[in-house]
Image: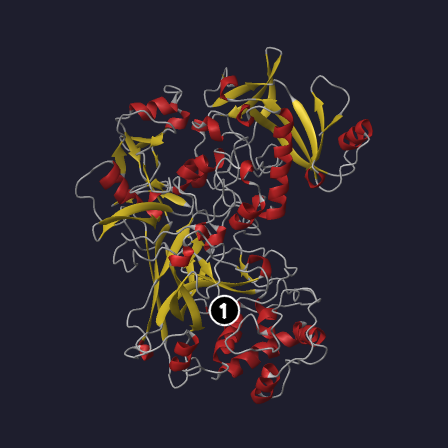
Amino acid sequence: MALIDDVKVVCDRLAPLGWQDLLLKVTGGQLNIVKPTEVALKTELTKTLTSIDRTVTGFTDFSLSGAKAITAGSPAGSLLYHALASPNVTAGISGFPTLKEIEMVENYVFGAQPPTLESLKSKAGLTGSQRLSVVLFAYEYRPARDTCTGRQADMVFSRTGVSRVGTRPAFYDARNRGFQAQVADDPFAFRVCPSRFAAFLAVKRKGSDDVTIMRTQPGDSTRDFWVPIHKLFNGTECLAGLNLEVELSAFHYNDKIRRTRAVTLRMARVPATSPFQFSTGIAELSTDTSLGAGIVTPVPHPRLIEPATVNGQLLTYRVPPGQKTFAALEPGATSGVDGSEIRPAPAYVHARTQVRNGALIDLNNDPLRPDVNDTVSTGNYRALHYVDFTGDGQISATVSALTGKPEVAASVVPCYSLVAAPDFFTSAGQRELFERVPDNFWGVPPVPLCDTRLPANLQMPGNRFSAAEKTISAIVSLLGPAPGSVTIPQSFDADRHSCLPDDCAGVFAPGWDVSTDRTRVAGTQVQHLAAYGLGSPFPEDTKLCAALSTFWPAVAPDASRAMSPNTGNPNLRATVAPLTDEEIGQAGALPWDGVTGPKVTTFNGEEFLDCEKFLHVDYVKHALEGRFTPRLTAQVSSEEYMLRMQAIAKCYSTVGGDRNMRFVVSFRKISAGDPELQRAQLDTSTVLSGEVYRIDMILGGEETEHPHPSDFRRSLLPIQDRQVFLVGPRIDTALRKRANQAVWSRVS
């Protein structure tokens, strides 16, 4: 079946769902996707359009140089492809394309005029014996705001793809042209979120050449980047004179328990079999025909983690004695050249489930040993290992029709694939926050993974990655000149999972999506990315990330106000990106992590804030019990996230002093009709326009924490220096009332 036949099937299905009318409108009646024959449709799609109305919603960021429905070799210059693939094109449409249908049109873009290998060499500027390479990439078609230049909607590519684990099968949201993590009828379930890969003919270029890089880094002019030129797909229309069959393969592995035992505990003869090290049940190439080719889907499991067993028996380890900070097995780390942590084994290993004579003892809840950190530090007991289903690996391909071709290198270059923890803020991107929020807001700046210049995991079984490829997590565009436009068109964020590294954390302490290790290559120690340095299981590290002032903001909620302030790191304790009362369970019944936020209570006539003790909160237990939920946090956009940060920053600047000595009692958005807001505006002759946040704050650092008189798992904070703020971050204005005041005042 010819590609145009596939495209006609797609057009015929979608035309009556609003697509025919929309494209006629955008082109002033020039483009009609309903044609009686494939030949007529091809003529229609490849003719020049003299009018494209870029004021129509969804088309404002269509390439200014685009003048056809299908421009050979140019997804960004193909109006039909843009319309079907852009998540911004939704108005007036009653049905949307499947991912397979988008793939059909995408393949036609690259196959409308099948190039020869020699012509692609010429396009890449290769001469003589210089060759193209078959290279794997993860990729997405994005609105302009999320592309390398920001000037037009375009495809973006990375040599690293990121999928996310879950408890339910993947769901493709056709309207948003992407995968969603939420499950409509179960707020405590997580859908797995896949990544999308394809093989491309590509060329290696220095960053100083004609390479369009997202967020260029110092030194990129001397670094090599793989840059895609032409997509490879099955059939005779991909490359002139050749009949291609592209066979993709996927490998992933999890090495956390083996490395914990072999490296941290120095145990001999640790097996390389499950659950110590395993390569099944992590992620696989999808067989769902509606998704098309190259979709790597994590395997859904009933729970995000499970107790580790061997032959039906619980797998345990002896906890060594030694002072701990976070009531976990904490092996410590060495530092890389840039200060990042080197982790040859999991940074934090759960140690709070004691196994004695086959019985499980929860050390968080043991009244005979109320100090859980002291119990773990004393050690000399058997603790249960837990297994999670994260990992990393490689995606490769075979294209037998290109074997032996003088224009193409013999070796296929595989792509790095991360299978990471869930993203609780699917609508807020790491790169967006890093670019738009001032550095002084953060405890640690939220560097996105696309900025990292390290090679992939060089120690995975059957490694085929090169230590020299330090740009594997960079994001680039198709080979060619950048758009000529100097204006930034209007576009809107895509409310969907992204599988590219700009939506991942590039801070390694130890990390959220990936950590780092190092190994000796040709006599030199080389630092590289690796998933096995994260928490074992991953929720063990999630609590630390969340409690330490939103260390990894785009994916880790800031839970610092949901638990006691004694987190083990007094310099990263203050709330930076506050969660609302609903998101931490102070109101409603959906705390994101299963921890119900603090409540005001009275003991002996004195008011206190009653909260769970940080060290006794166990995210591993919560994961087993299915208490995590993305329902509320997934609704927080990048814009909302930044407004919250600006609001809390205004409060800190007003009260002055060390922000780590302040505790947020309540944080919520209020409406214009709120009686308290109206009273405050009258008192101050001020109108707070835009979003308004009510923030209740007390003095509450570690020094103020008191033991709870009847529950060793909880702490009390005395209500001291209580101040309530109403903040309008868009106008940088705040109104304040102290606990002993009746009248509101305006603060500058």
Give the camera-side residue of 263 and 422.
Answer: 263
Q: Position of residue 474 (x, y in %)?
A: 43, 56
Q: Where is residue 430 in the image (x, y as percent from the top left)?
A: 51, 48
Q: In this view, does 736 lie to the left or right of 156?
A: right
Q: Where is residue 149 in the image (x, y as percent from the top left)?
A: 55, 60
Find the residue positioned furthest to the left.
269
Is residue 313 visible from the viewing direction of this image? Answer: no
The quadrant the C terminus occupies is top right
Q: Residue at x 45, y 30 (%)?
A: 617
Q: Is residue 339 left or right of residue 545?
A: left
Classed neighbour count for the residue bearing mark 1: other residues with Cα under 10 Å, few (<14), some (14–19), many (≥20)? some
**Rendered image quadrant of residue 729:** top right
Give the camera-side residue of 408 and 616.
Answer: 408
Q: In this view, does 350 lie to the left or right of 745?
A: left
Q: Residue at x 32, y 68 (%)?
A: 412
- What element does badge 1 sit on? helix
Three-letter code for the amino acid on which mark 1 is drawn: Ser
**Position above or below: 46 against 685:** below
Tally the marks. 1
**Rendered image quadrant of residue 408:** bottom left
**Rendered image quadrant of residue 471:** bottom left
Is residue 46 visible from the viewing direction of this image? Answer: yes
**Coloration of the structure image:** secondary structure
Q: Position of residue 386 (x, y in %)?
A: 34, 41
Give the camera-side residue of 33 and 201.
Answer: 201
**Position above or below: 206 against 744:** below
**Position above or below: 156 against 371:** below
**Residue bearing the label numbered 1:** 290
